[in-house]
Amino acid sequence: MHPLSLFLLFFLASSFNVIGIMGGEDSGELSNPFTPKAYLIRYWKKQISNDLAKPWFLLNKASPLNAAQYAGYSKMAADGGESLSTQLPGFCSSANLLCFPDLSPSLEKHAGNVNFASYSFKNFTNYGTDRAGGVDSFKNYTDNENIPVDSFRRYSRDSVGHEDRFSNYAPNGNVVDQSFNTYGTSSTGGKGKFSNYGPEVNVPDMRFTSYSDAANGREQGFASYSDNANAGDQGFTSYGKNGNGATNGFSGYGSNSNVIGSTFSNYGQTANGANDTFSSYGFNGNVPENNFRTYGTGGNAAVETFKGYRDQSNVGDDSFQSYGKSSSAAVANFQNYGKSFNEGTDKFTGYSGNEKTTFTGYGVNNTFKDYAKTGVSFSNYINESSAVAASLAAEAKARGEKVKNRWVEPGKFFREKMLKSGTIMPMPDIKDRMPKRSFLPRVIASKLPFSTSKIGALKQLFHAADDSTMAKMLADALSECERAPSRGETKRCVTSVEDMIDFATSVLGRNVVVRTTENTEGSTKDIMIGSIKGINGGKVTKSVSCHQSLFPYLVYYCHSVPKVRVYEADLLDPKSKSKINHGVAICHIDTSSWSSTHGAFIALGSGPGKIEVCHWIFENDMTWAVAD
């Protein structure tokens, strides 16, 4: 037989064997052995020593690139991503990455009233500039968009009596990026209403730069702004600076939000007669952080009210730097401010000049430096950290209620004794809220920059402007990856499935199994424990747990977890007793190195090292253990 014929026969046989080895789910898509997914499954077969069922929930996160795309993008990645940057939209689409669209400039100007409904990805430059009167309505704007990115630049600038309404803006969005630059600058009268703006949003990032700067009598209302949001940041720079008689209301701002941060820089600086109200701002939030820098400095006769601000929140930090400094006849009223469920920290530096300030029912852990002693009233001010829990508990008891905090969700943490057949317990929200992405092939990921020292190259690759959502996302993920491990922890951020396999087997050996909860059925409802099994006979063991990071491509933070017990259980509907899910739970036996402010101790009422803590493995998270 001709040598070429022998080669072709060998090649076809090899291809057939690859498909046979892969088997199972999606085997029809693996007819080409040169795709990233085909390579990954061969790698799994080589590195894992058992023949147990393959974890398709993990293997299906492999790059969807076809063989030609894989070869082409791998070659382009050789220069560290410079070439890929020129082909970013196509690369992101083909590889299933999280990338923001590049908004092209717009010089549109409209004289009449405009209604924007179900609209997205728009650059509003010079929009509404010099407008006299009229109403623009943004209703259901970017509704259910995954990555809405909009820019409002010089919107309503120099306008007279112009009203803007942002109603139900970007609801249920994921990783929202909005920029309001010189919005309403030098305008006279009119209203800007942000109602139900960004509700239920994951990672909102809003920037208000020179917002209503030098405006005259313009009213701004932020009602239910970023309510129920997750891990967002809001920036108000030179907001209302040099304004005259402006009224701003922040009502229900950031309520029930998770790790939301707001920065007010030069807010109301040298303003005249401003009236600002922060009502239920950051209420019941988880670790809200707010920074008021040179807020109201040099202002005249301003009235500031902080009512129910950060009330019943978990931890949280606020910083007031040069707040009201050199102001004249200002009034600041802090009512029930910072009475956190778990005490936070507040700093007042260079606060107040000739103003009257009242603190009523103000929280703990507060630092007053260079703070004006005259004209300041402290009523029912809590001076000891232990008083917070006692105060809240007493108030709740008087109302016949229990102290509750949204961020210690029922069922999020529980004791090991709950894991018994027949137990009915609440299941927390285990749904994955992050954008859907895929891993990059190891060949490509290994060539791209991945460190804070190379953040500039990464920003160039993903077209991330300074202070943008993408830039912050990159920096946050890399910082967490480079964080020093905790005591007894071994950690690694993996940028490919192959890297994850290597890390897990380096800790546990090659005879391993990776598990996750089967689906999200039962989430936020009561469930009944059916049949239950302790992994490795229910003995104390160690595992490797992996959690998603927010990054353009899939990156997992994996760490070894010593002294745990792992369980898998059928989860039943409590009424019909029918199986609805198959859950995986992990119980941490040694909690001595955990923070005393950990949500588990708030939920279960104990402290580090005193109890074991269990939790379910959430959707798209996973835990590795030695195979039984």
Image (tube, rainbow, N blue to C red):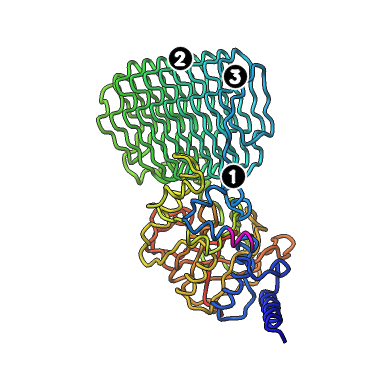
Inspect the image, locate mark 1, and give the three-letter code of the amino acid beneath it.
Asn
Q: Is residue 152 above or below residue 596?
A: above
Q: Which residue is mark 3?
A: 163
Secondary structure at numbered mark 3: strand
Q: CA distance from mark 3 to mark 2?
A: 17 Å
Looking at marks 3 and 1 on the same chain, the residue that comes earlier in the sequence is marked by 3
- Residue 125 shows in this picture: yes
Q: Is residue 147 above or below residue 331?
A: below
Q: Which residue is mark 2?
A: 245
Inspect the image, locate mark 2, and give the three-letter code of the amino acid beneath it.
Gly
Secondary structure at numbered mark 2: loop
Q: Which mark is residue 49?
A: none
Looking at marks 3 and 2 on the same chain, the residue that comes earlier in the sequence is marked by 3
Secondary structure at numbered mark 1: loop
Tell me the magenta residue range: 68-72
* Label 3 Cα neighbours within 10 Å, binned few <14 / some 14-19 / many ≥20: many
- From the top left corner, tell me how far across and down residue 450 is, in percent: 44, 56
Q: Is residue 567 left or right of residue 599?
A: right
Do labels 2 and 1 touch, CB within 8 Å? Answer: no
Name the quadrant containing residue 116.
Answer: top right
Q: Which residue is mark 1?
A: 174
Q: How many marks?
A: 3
Do labels 3 and 1 touch, CB within 8 Å? Answer: no
Tell me the quarter of the image containing the C terminus: bottom right
